[in-house]
Image: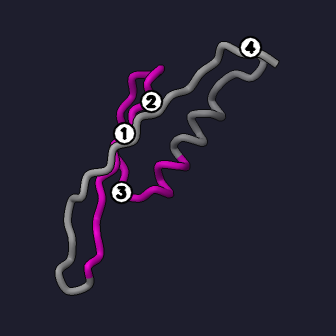
Amino acid sequence: MESNHVASFVVRFHLANKEESTGKKYWRIKVTHVQEELETMFETIEEVLIFMKEAMEDYDLNEL
């Protein structure tokens, strides 16, 4: 099945802070949904994956 529907995401990780005592790292993650020109910030990779999954579910599969 051939399709012209494409979804592209750019994911950038920026180390925002690191606790000296525990070594725990805090990240700021910026995700750009290229086709929608939408940028969103997250703190965890789990939030990023949920965002990407929901973005993919928004595509109208009836158009394929």
Residue bearing the label numbered 4: 63
Residue 44 percent across, percent down from the top left? 41, 59
Q: Which of the labelled discs sits on residue 33, or is there none? A: 2
Residue bearing the label numbered 3: 43
Between 37 and 4, which is closer to the camera in this rendering? 4
> Separation of disc 1 and disc 2 at Cα?
8 Å
- Quadrant for the C terminus in the image: top right
Q: Earlier in the sequence, mark 4 or mark 3?
A: 3
> Which residue appears farthest toward the bottom when viewing the image?
21
Q: Secondary structure at mark 1?
A: strand
Q: Earlier in the sequence, mark 3 or mark 2?
A: 2
* Labels 1 & 2 near each other (Cβ < 8 A): yes
- The boundaries of the magenta stretch are 23-50
Residue 36 lies in the magenta-colored region? yes
Q: Amino acid at mark 2?
A: His
> Separation of disc 4 and disc 2 at Cα?
20 Å
> Separation of disc 1 and disc 3 at Cα?
10 Å
Quick check: 47 left or right of 43?
right
Q: Is residue 32 above or below residue 62?
A: below
Q: Amino acid at mark 1?
A: Thr
Q: Residue at x 50, y 28 (%)?
A: 8
Residue 19 percent across, percent down from the top left? 20, 77
